[in-house]
Image (cartoon, rainbow, N blue to C red):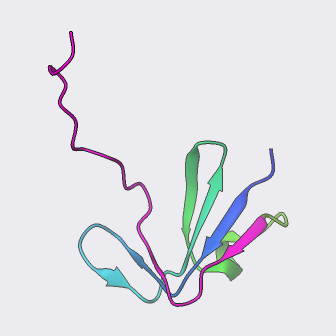
């Protein structure tokens, strides 16, 4: 499976926006690496360029009503 490299202007690491990290590498359903395109872009991944955007890797929907439906 070919990896995907998503590149923006910064990455939010859960505590702060990091301008020194600008890319997220994904393979299948898993995040493989977070860093700069030069460091994590090996192997010719598919590139998705998002200039001007801040990436939020691993963000999921935590607003769920677990007991709403039996």
Which of 65/21 is in front?
65
Which residue is most to the front? 69
Q: Position of residue 19 (x, y in %)?
A: 43, 89
Task: Examine the rendered structure and indicate whether residue 30 appears above or below residue 67.
Answer: below
Q: How many marks?
A: 0
Query: In the figure, residue 37 lies in which quadrant?
Result: bottom right
Q: Is 58 situated left or right of 24 in this image?
A: left
Instruction: Pinpoint residue 1: horizontal percent, then vertical percent.
Output: 80, 44
Q: Residue furthest right?
A: 44
Label the magenta part by its dominant secondary structure: loop
- 51 drawn magenta: yes
Q: Is residue 45 magenta?
A: no
Quarter of the image with the C terminus is top left
**Residue drawn at point x = 74 percent, y = 55 percent:** 3
Q: Name which residue lies at 21% across and 16% down.
A: 69
Above or below: residue 34 compared with residue 17: above
- Residue 12's spot in the image, x, y percent? 36, 74
Drawn side of residue 44 relative to residue 4, left or right: right
Q: Is residue 69 left or right of residue 8?
A: left
Camera-nearest residue between 39 and 59: 59
Work out whether 65 lies above or below 27: above
Q: Which residues are magenta?
A: 46-70
Image spot of residue 53 (x, y percent): 49, 83
Q: Quadrant of residue 43?
A: bottom right
Residue drawn at (56%, 61%) of the image: 33
Q: Residue at x 31, y 46 (%)?
A: 61
């Amino acid at each position: 499976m070919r990896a995907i490299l998503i590149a923006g202007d910064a990455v939010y690491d859960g505590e702060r926006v990091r301008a020194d990290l600008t890319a997220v590498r994904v393979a299948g359903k898993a995040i493989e690496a977070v860093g700069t395109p030069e460091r994590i872009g090996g192997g010719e991944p598919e590139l998705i360029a998002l200039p001007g955007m801040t990436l939020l890797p691993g963000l999921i929907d935590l607003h769920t009503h677990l007991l709403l439906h039996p």
